[in-house]
Amino acid sequence: METKNATVSKPRRLSMEGLRRTISDISLELSKETIDAAAQQLPRISEVEDASCECCGLYEECTPDYINQVRDKFSGKLVCGLCAEAINEETQKNGGKRKKL
Ligand SMILES: [Zn+2]
């Protein structure tokens, strides 16, 4: 009886190992895809585009992320670094309050 149980449980253990191997194969494949996706996102982040300052008209090379940050900060206006500094100075003079556009 006990020897029979041992022979029955043996193939089950083997199939479990096979399943575990499949899972590790899948997770290996997944992590590879994650790395691929991250690598694909890298050139998109470093990509720059010409943007003109809405204040003085100066052209600057900006990443889309930077443009979004500036627009967030200055009520949807895209300004160059110089104008951004000037605006910050002006807002500090006004007690840190900025006119809403
Ligand atoms: Zn400017």
Image: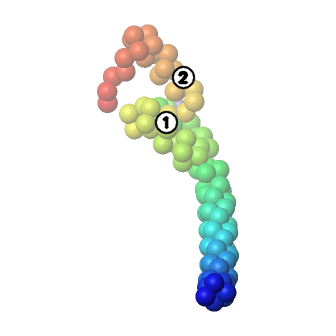
Seen in the picture, residue 32 relative to 54 is either above or below; the reply is below
Residue placed most toward the observer, 88 or 65: 65
Tell me which residue sits at (49%, 20%) in the image: 88
Residue at the extreme front? 1
Residue 70 got which mark?
1
Give amino acid for label 2: Glu
| Secondary element at tag 2 | helix
Tell me which residue sits at (39%, 10%) in the image: 95
| Secondary element at tag 1 | helix
Which residue is identified by label 2? Answer: 85
Seen in the picture, residue 4 relative to 86 is either above or below; the reply is below
The 10 Å Cα crowd at callout 1, few under 14, some 14 to 19, many 20 or more, is some
Report how far apart the C-alphas of labels 2 and 1 lie in the structure: 12 Å
Tell me which residue sits at (37%, 21%) in the image: 98
Q: Do callouts 2 and 1 mark residues in contact (Cβ within 8 Å)?
A: no
Q: Is residue 18 visible?
A: no
Between disc 2 and disc 1, the foreground one is: 1
Residue 35, image x, y percentages: 66, 62
Residue 63, image x, y percentages: 59, 46
Residue 35 got which mark?
none
